[in-house]
Image (tube, rainbow, N blue to C red):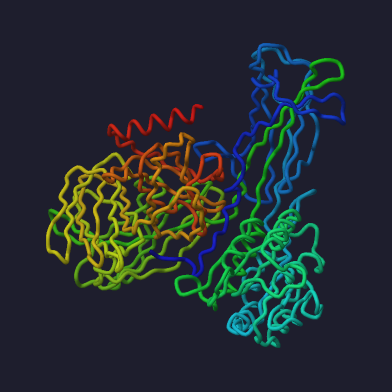
Amino acid sequence: MKRKKLITLIFVLVGLVLPTLLVQSKTTIFLNETSPLETNITSSLDNVTIEMITDLPSYRDDNIPSILPGEPFTVRFNVTNKADQILNMLELSSEANEFGAILNPSTSTKDSLEVGESWLTDEQTVLTVAEGGEGGAGATSSALDLAIVLDQSGSMSEEIEALTNELINVVDEIDSEVPNLRVGLLLFGGSSQYNPLLSPSLIHPLTFEVSEIVNVLSRTQATGSQEPWGDALYCAKNYLEWRTEAVKLVILITDEPNNSGSLIKNAVDLTNLYHQYADSEFILCTILASGWYGTTKEELMEGAEITEGTFIEIGSEYPQTGDIPEIIGELIVLYAVEMDLKLTVQLSHEIELGVREGIEETFVVLLDDLPPEIDTWVYFSEDFLTEELYVNIMSEVKDVTGLPFVEIYYKFDDAPFWTITNATALFNDSYCLSLVFNNQQQFLYYQIYTEDWLGNEIYDEEQTINLSNSYQYSIIPASTKKDIILFPNQNIIFRLVGDLTEDSYGLIIGNTYETYNIIAADVEDSIIFLENNASYYDSFIIPTGHTVKIALMSTEYVNVVIANVVPQIIEFNETFKVEIDADDAYLYKVDNTFTNKKDRQFYADSREVQTGIYVFKAADMEFLDKHYAIVELEEEEYFILVVADYHYGEIDVGFTFEEDYTPYNHYYKTSSWPIIVTLFGLAALLGLLKRRKR
């Protein structure tokens, strides 16, 4: 798969993690203007509906409107009385959060609202915060103050060198996105005297001049072995002059556990400090340098989790030390440009003289100033009848606002000019260009362009396909997956390469109602072990070190997921974090055959990443259903396949009681999923529906 960046941290699409479109609070009885009393009694407002009406378009199935930051829109609210009594002396007011400002705030009133009657409130104009924070009156700037808390002990010389060489370049690159940025630096480590709590000279104040920080880094020598970074975090929070209106971001970089501190000495002290960060709205991101040991990883992960920051590990299978400056740049953009616009509406009426009853609801407008997200897979096929060769460029192009088109620019190496064509939209978010080529053509060059309905656009980087190396494009290594589209009467071959230490599972799942034909052979054993016609899904074991070759064909267009995954056992009450990318796939074995009747769930979720969860019956690998982020479990053993549907990065994975985890709200639309009706699958589906009604 083509990647757009070396480091893939998640730029949260603005508005992706907003609360649900309509949130109703408890009933509130106002005895007077200053003493509201919350109560759970039945309210006469329980059957009153409030609808938000704007002049904004929506291209989404749920009708949530979208707008570019910095633009105004008008809003009114339609109140309908579906209760069984007349409502008197109604008042409705609204307010925007910090990412918008109501230019003509007022309270709409109505003397009475008859049963079944609707009331359209006064029109208001809302101005959204502009990109970079230059919004209208009352808008909050997306200024950001960053403190880098850096280990300068003997093992950190490469990290110091990387920051010295590249930090200025990274800040220059993101200047247009985060123009209001200050950077500070706290050094620690080496010996007991290198503790900013004891040596204030190790604290370098927040400044707009990043060159001042780089000058300090250029004079810093890595030496010694003591790491009192708990004290350094305390100093970062309490000794720097943070702006009240700015996002407060602290990035800790170290490879060893907290030790030799004067104030923050143990795990309890650290946890308390993390909670102080969270209570003061500080975001702590932690970077685990290569060569770490001991409890360092657990301590850094805890800090990022409590403060809703990001944990990143550096190492052989992860980003490298030289990538740390770019990681810092992406974290700055991530936390500086994220904007959530919410309009909170308060509706009340008089139930008797001097006593009012009210409800509160929150509405969402998606602020979208980020371009669509593009993931691309290349694969080859052959027409079964004519034997013509095809190269297929499949792109998943996703955006919360929606897309009017996807263009592909392409040119074969023997062609003098580029050709522009619209990619074929075959399924939800899936676009494909299928081109015939011959043996004399060696290379295909292509580039993808698209924009969403708001005009946010992206030109993907130019890519090159080696047409003489179709074998390489057909390989699916262990722990990865491919999304492909089967074209009518085209034969497609893939090779699932087994893991070198243990068996893996090959999983093929059709994402549509159409079926496909499959032949699978073990290359090492030279035997065909699977041959199915009209399949919706298939599964098989890939022995350790073996390669399984599969051939797929269909008479219709079929969207198929092919995964090669090594199963992992997850125990009840086990929770952990993993990084997931567009090509990654994880398979978990879950044993939910407990006598305890309390409901359990499996989740794979994060604020940024929307996951797809495919559920299989463990006994025979029968595919049951697909879910998103979370699935409630019947008493059964399961295999659960986890892939990233939208955005990539770190996710939380867990097998817990149902009430122990609440998934995030994701505004990326999900496609409908075909129900594969089997006796067990239907029973499981009915069980899940019954639970949701409780």
Q: Is residue 181 left or right of residue 173?
A: right
Residue in the foreground of this view, choosing between 241 and 245? 241
Quarter where residue 475 is shown: bottom left
Residue 516 versus residue 462 in the image, above or below: above
* Residue in view at x 75 percent, y 44 percent: 101
How many marks the image carries: the answer is 0
In percent of the image, x 75 and y 80: which residue is there? 212
Q: Looking at the picture, how far across and down is residue 654, in whole percent?
A: 49, 50
Along the line of sight, which residue is nearer the eye, 572 or 542?
Answer: 572
**Residue reaching furthest to the front:** 595
Nearer-the-camera pick, 293 or 462 = 293
Along the line of sight, which residue is nearer the eye, 401 or 23? 23
Q: In this view, does 119 lie above or below 262?
A: above
Residue 536 position, x and y percent, is 26, 43
Query: Splitting the image into 4 quarters, where does residue 95 fall?
Result: top right
Give how far across and how far down residue 260 sits, in percent: 71, 75
Question: Residue 677: x, y in percent?
Answer: 29, 33
Q: In which quarter of the image is the N terminus?
A: bottom left
On screen, 102 above or below 604? above
